[in-house]
């Protein structure tokens, strides 16, 4: 099957980067709005029997971008595409992966059902907030990792001879351990208690950070409240410098302001979510492209090769 790569409006810059690595042009697609806000999609080239890849992170505004993905998928299936793969670098609603209160939804599962109903045959994503979300799908899901790309960048940008990787909570220990292994560092853990949505309280630090460069590792940065408090706690425990690494730069609300006011020297994020203007202008935020990793995943899937090498 011949490959076709299309992109919605969520992150066209990253889609172009993926296309460059693949050595193929982006397909011609028009994603517009009717006057009442309804989404209209027109695929302007033949996809019959083709291997179609739709690049669309479901970041802010999540509802619009999810709907764009579903409509594009439906258009491709009705045009007799051979296979449709959704490349979703950031999976929106991933934090709603379980019931946390009576009568609460599991919205991550709902989104998975919508994706499958739209006729998508496979999903490629990156750093799911909870790995078990893969089980919400009855189709193959490749959950890639941003850690290898970020760790390579950190090794080039930061002196890691005396370094400790810090997990901002107990749930991120495995992620921190993997990152520490890649850069040859020890780990520490912050014991955190969350007092409400987007609110957290740092209690104490487990591990040794004194006289070391600390790198806080997380899967995403939303309002940056946890990150700001974690960085402060690490510095108060004697770290000589504090950096942060995260795959998804959600950066909502006062996030950029908090990062600017924090003790952090630099925050490294990937381009799974395009930065808003204030974040792009922030000198403390550095963006690392994962376009090559996503392109290699697409290449391997298209040629029926193993994708496992990208998980290392």
Image (cartoon, rainbow, N blue to C red):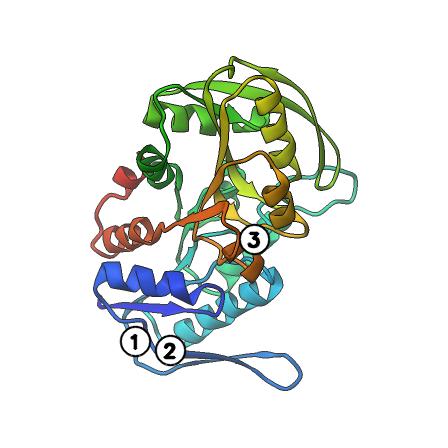
Residue 48's disc is 1
Name the element at disc 2.
Answer: loop
Residue 75, compared with residue 59, is above or below; it is below
Residue 220's disc is none
Q: Position of residue 9 (x, y in %)?
A: 48, 70
> Front-most of 52 and 237?
237
Q: Residues within 10 Å of mark 2 (few under 14, many from 20)?
A: some
Tag 1 and tag 3, C-beta contact below 8 Å: no
Front: mark 3 or 2: 3
Q: In the rendered view, does 283 fall on the left or right side of 298?
A: right
List the single residue furthest toward the right: 102
Tag 2 and tag 1, C-beta contact below 8 Å: yes
Q: Position of residue 309 (x, y in %)?
A: 26, 38
How far is the residue under mark 1 from the one under mark 3? 29 Å
Residue at the (56%, 50%) spot, across then down: 250
- Res. 144 image quadrant: top left
Residue 170, compared with residue 146, is above or below; it is above
Residue 261, compared with residue 239, is above or below; it is below
Q: Identify the residue position indicated by label 2 in the image.
A: 79
């Amino acid at each position: 099957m011949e490959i076709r790569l299309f992109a919605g409006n969520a992150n066209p810059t990253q889609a172009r980067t993926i296309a460059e690595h693949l050595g193929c042009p982006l397909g011609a697609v028009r994603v517009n709005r009717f006057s009442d806000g309804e989404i209209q999609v027109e695929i302007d080239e033949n996809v019959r029997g083709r291997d179609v890849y739709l690049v669309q992170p479901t970041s802010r505004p999540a509802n619009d971008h999810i709907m764009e993905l579903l409509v594009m998928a439906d258009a491709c299936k009705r045009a007799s595409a051979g296979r449709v793969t959704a490349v979703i670098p950031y999976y929106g609603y991933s934090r709603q992966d379980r019931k946390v209160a009576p009568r609460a939804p599991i919205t991550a599962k709902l989104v998975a059902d919508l994706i499958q109903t739209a006729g998508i045959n496979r999903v490629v994503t990156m750093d799911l907030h909870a790995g078990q979300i893969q089980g919400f799908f009855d189709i193959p899901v490749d959950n890639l990792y941003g850690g290898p790309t970020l760790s390579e960048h950190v090794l080039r940008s930061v002196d890691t001879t005396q370094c400790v990787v810090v997990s901002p909570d107990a749930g991120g220990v495995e992620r921190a351990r993997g990152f520490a292994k890649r850069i040859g560092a020890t780990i520490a853990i912050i014991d955190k208690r969350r007092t409400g949505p987007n609110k957290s309280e740092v209690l104490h630090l487990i591990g040794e950070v004194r006289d070391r460069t600390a790198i806080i590792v997380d899967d995403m940065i939303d309002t940056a409240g946890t990150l700001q408090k974690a960085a402060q706690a690490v510095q108060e425990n004697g770290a000589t410098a504090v950096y942060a690494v995260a795959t998804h730069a959600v950066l909502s609300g006062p996030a950029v302001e908090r990062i600017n006011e924090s003790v952090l020297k630099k925050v490294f994020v990937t381009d799974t979510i395009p930065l808003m203007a204030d974040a792009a202008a922030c000198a403390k935020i550095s963006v690392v492209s994962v376009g090559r990793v996503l392109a290699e995943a697409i290449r391997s899937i298209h040629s029926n090769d193993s994708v496992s090498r990208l998980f290392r």
